Amino acid sequence: MAAVGLGVAMSAMVAGYSIAAAPPLTHLPIAVPKKCGDPVNFKKTDPDKVLSKLPAFIQKWYYPYYSEVKATPWTNWKGKKGPWTVGVINFPVDNPWQVSVMDTLKKQFALAKKKGLVEGSLQLYVQPDWATATPDQQIAALQSMVRKGVDIVIQHPLNTFAQSKSVDAAGKAGVPVIQMANVDSGSKYVVNDISSNQPPGISEFMKLYYNKGWFRGDKTYNTVEVRGVQGNDFETVVHDTWTAVAKSCPGVKLVGTVFGNWAPATAKTEMLKFLSSYTGNVDFIEHGGAMQAGVIQAYQAVGKNMPPPMQMGGTTGGDLSWWCDHPEYDSVGYEYGGGQVGYTLFDVAMRMLAGKGLKLRDLSFPAFKATPKTVCKIATPGKDVTWVGDIAGPINTWVGGNPKNLDYFFKKPGSPLHGAKG
């Protein structure tokens, strides 16, 4: 995901905290890799002994997870009597991944309503514009939903640190909040749900080019960092991961930083601004996800059909199509679709409300490793780079390729929405 053309009210104060300033550490310490391209290590201690109780193959999914894995008060929660009401809070929807998430959540709600599991309409609050988006607005939206009796909320937080207290307040009132694609490491009542796809993507991209002979200490390699939403916790993790990896790769020189808001259009605009003023060479681009299409378009706008190499993690629509149609573009990325996220988060919500007994606070699922040889398995060939689409394939396979794997995260198996098979 993203970074800013956000001259925004991102400096707005929330509970005495300015998200224009650096937030407190939102991830576990990162050990600098000993060799360029080695995996980053987020040191976990499993303080509540919940990670160690998962099957060994699922424990491996957590190696890029950047927070401690904790127990949750929802384990012994008996749920609520249905039909239920569901709320969704999101920041501005302006990339293919976000569009697919929202479309899928709406479709899953319609399916649940057809089965008599939910009632009314999906309660939505989507911030309209980055120029006015603040954590305060999401906090107010959550408080309003709790007052109106919503049973559960799925939220894509603008800043988890600023919003953590509101999530716990909702939890104490009996309303679980499931965080989408982010981690609130300080909340007791939150449910974190993510594929931490960028850390392994960054490491493996650097390893790919190390194996080509780069980063051996005999040359300088100029890079531009395309970052996500300024002040967002996950964006901070991506940036800090990249910083740690770069320290182990001799010769890396940062010549520019642009914030693209995890939005291709913003990334294109900001990248063009950089290219119009920078006269040097760019050897590769460090990329924070979901903005590849904007970078590609920026280079096309200045007469170059191919951008410098960049990590391709977090791609979904037209950028995946472009990569599939250009197999000579040597890169790597870890991908998971918006449809997969919408499907799985809604299913987690239904299981919780049905009293299935969530075993732990933190859910970490694996992402698909894309390379020039595998990308066409999840891409839709022939689409324009601006195409708003999702990765190809079933939307119920985010949990390690098998929706039944979600049973391992609950005391009682089965989904009230999708049946015994999840």
Image: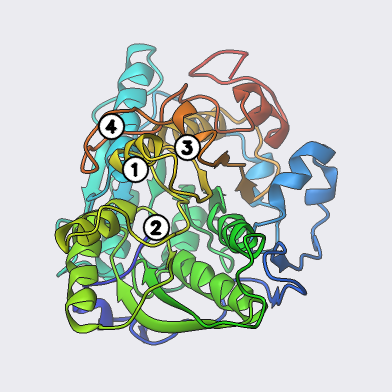
Of the two numbered discs 3 and 1 on the same chain, state the one appearing first in sequence. 1
Local crowd size for mark 3, using a 10 Å CA cut-off: few (<14), some (14–19), many (≥20): many
Label 2 near label 3: C-beta < 8 Å?
no
Amino acid at dot 4: Asp
Q: Nearer the viewer, residue 275 or 352?
A: 275
Find the distance from the CA under tag 2 to the CA under tag 4: 18 Å
Which residue is the site of mark 3?
Answer: 345
Rendering colour mode: rainbow
Q: Secondary structure at mark 3?
A: helix
Real-space Cα separation, disc 3 to disc 1, in angstroms: 14 Å
Mark 4 vs 1, N-terminal side: 1
- Above or below: residue 107 compared with residue 247: above
Left or right, 270 with reference to 98: left
Counting from the top left corner in percent of width and height, residue 134 is at 25, 70
Residue 230, position as x, y percentages in the image: 34, 74
What SS does tag 1 mark? helix
Rendered residue at 17%/77% (across/down):
276
* Rendered-image quadrant of the N terminus: bottom left
Cα–Cα span, label 2 and label 1: 9 Å
Amino acid type of disc 2? Met
Mark toward the viewer: 2 or 4:
2
